[in-house]
Image: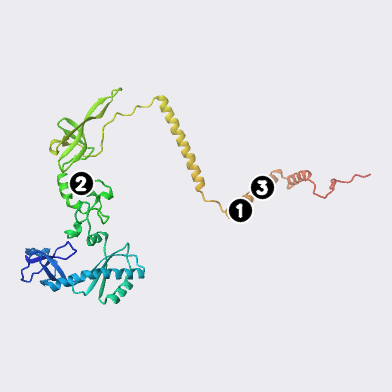
């Protein structure tokens, strides 16, 4: 165990441990402490207390002294300079053309460093900006990029409850918040109703999530079947905080065809968690309705014909889609195919002529006969006499 005191800095809800160095400090006493950034002005929030050594972040720094009137005046002077420093930094940001939003500026107590806080969508190259600011303020400059939650913590504001933001007032660190917590608490999933000033999910969803999970153990879900003292029922609504379950009884009726189906009673009954028995944990099972009527023979035939027509139309569409998806034939390929076809036809013609000559046994006689036959049918050329090629008759 180690004896420490708790110190909180202005504008921060987190409490830090420091070594009292054998001195006694009162609560709400202003002190000067040693930090990694140098000397800082703080406020005692916890008097000397023994804490486990595992909770201490080493090295444990010391409280230097109690703050006097001179230290208080210096702290107020540093706060007054913040507005002017913010205006000068904004001018330099506009001159450099950087896409960043300045949020706050902070002077260390000994003025050895000035810290500028800003937000941006991505990474920002502010090396030139740091050089310009160092030439103006003549001290060390630090630019720190923060998120939207940290921005709300630095700026402060009023929450939906009408009180100051928790992150500004007392929260030491941000806790992870998920949309599942809103579902567990049966809240509206409208982002405008469950989001804080920072645009993220409200931190107070985390505060009550543990008690909702504890009280929700054994509670049925909406649409689930349960066993009640009056019989089977379906859950319509639940209220975890007051342990109330609203449900409607299930009634079984018979239709004209003699088939049974289920129907909900109009009366809404209210039970406690201890009064019901869970049967089916699956949500939204609903009621069991009678099966649909079977189709007659004529309807079956029409349905079969319709199915065959749909199948044929589907096959036709598939063939048309396959034809359109084929790559177009290139011109060179078509020309080569035409030449191959002509060569094939010439080869087959020569083969037929050779076979006919061998069968006739007279050499080229059949060929000459066919050639003379073709010559007789050939048309005369232009410019030639009609009786050209005919033997002259002797007078």
- Which-is-in-front pick, marks 1 and 3? 1
Tag 2 and tag 1, C-beta contact below 8 Å = no
Q: Residues within 10 Å of mark 1 (few under 14, many from 20)?
A: few
* Residue positioned 7% across, 71% down in the render: 21
Among the two numbered marks 1 and 3 on one chain, the one whose residue lies closer to the N terminus: 1
Q: Residues within 10 Å of mark 3 (few under 14, many from 20)?
A: few
Tag 2 and tag 3, C-beta contact below 8 Å = no
Q: Position of residue 210 (x, y in %)?
A: 16, 50
Tag 2 residue: 185
Q: Quadrant of the C terminus?
A: top right
Observer-nearest of 279 and 317: 279
Tag 1 residue: 335
Tag 3 residue: 349
Q: Quick check: 25 left or right of 98?
A: left
- Which-is-in-front pick, marks 2 and 3? 2
* Residue positioned 25% across, 25% down in the render: 253
Q: Position of residue 334 (x, y in %)?
A: 59, 52
* Res 48 → quadrant: bottom left
Q: Position of residue 22 (x, y in %)?
A: 5, 71
* Residue positioned 32% across, 67% down in the render: 124
* Res 101 → quadrant: bottom left
Q: Residues within 10 Å of mark 2 (few under 14, many from 20)?
A: some
Among the two numbered marks 2 and 3 on one chain, the one whose residue lies closer to the N terminus: 2
Q: Is residue 214 above or below residue 139?
A: above
Say what secondary structure mark 3 lies in: helix
Task: Specify the label residue 113 is tagged with.
Answer: none
């Amino acid at each position: 165990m180690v004896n420490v005191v708790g110190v909180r800095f202005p504008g921060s809800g987190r409490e830090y441990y420091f070594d009292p160095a054998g001195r006694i400090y009162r609560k709400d006493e202003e002190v000067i402490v040693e930090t990694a950034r140098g000397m800082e002005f703080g406020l005692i929030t916890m008097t000397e207390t023994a804490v486990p050594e595992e909770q201490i972040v080493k090295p444990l720094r010391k409280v230097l002294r109690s703050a006097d009137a001179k230290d208080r005046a210096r702290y107020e002077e540093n706060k007054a300079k913040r507005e002017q420093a913010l205006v000068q930094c904004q001018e330099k940001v506009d001159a450099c053309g950087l896409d960043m939003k300045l949020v706050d500026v902070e002077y260390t107590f000994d003025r050895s460093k000035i810290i500028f806080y800003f937000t941006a969508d991505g990474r920002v190259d502010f090396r030139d900006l740091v050089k310009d600011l160092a030439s103006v303020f003549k001290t060390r400059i630090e630019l720190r990029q923060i998120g939207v939650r940290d921005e709300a913590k630095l700026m402060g504001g009023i929450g939906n409850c009408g009180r100051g933001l928790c992150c500004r007032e007392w929260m030491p660190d941000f806790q992870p918040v998920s949309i599942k917590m809103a579902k567990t608490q049966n809240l509206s999933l409208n982002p405008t109703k469950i989001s804080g000033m920072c645009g993220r999910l409200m931190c107070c969803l985390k505060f009550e999530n543990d008690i909702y999970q504890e009280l929700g153990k054994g509670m049925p879900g909406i649409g689930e079947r349960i066993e009640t003292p009056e019989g089977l029922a379906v859950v319509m609504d639940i209220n975890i905080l007051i342990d109330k379950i609203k449900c409607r009884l299930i009634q079984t009726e018979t239709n004209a065809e003699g088939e049974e189906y289920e129907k909900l009673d109009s009366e809404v009954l209210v039970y406690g968690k201890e009064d019901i028995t869970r049967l089916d944990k699956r949500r939204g099972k609903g009621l069991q309705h009678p099966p649909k009527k079977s189709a007659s023979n004529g309807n079956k035939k029409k349905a079969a014909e319709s199915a065959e027509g749909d199948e044929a139309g589907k096959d036709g569409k598939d063939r048309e889609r396959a034809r359109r998806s084929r790559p177009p034939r290139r011109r060179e390929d078509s020309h080569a195919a035409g030449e191959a076809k002509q060569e094939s036809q010439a080869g087959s013609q020569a083969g037929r002529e050779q076979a006919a000559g061998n069968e006739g046994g007279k050499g080229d006689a059949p060929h000459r006969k066919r050639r003379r036959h073709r010559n007789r049918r050939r048309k005369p050329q232009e410019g030639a006499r009609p009786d050209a090629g005919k033997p002259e008759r002797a007078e």
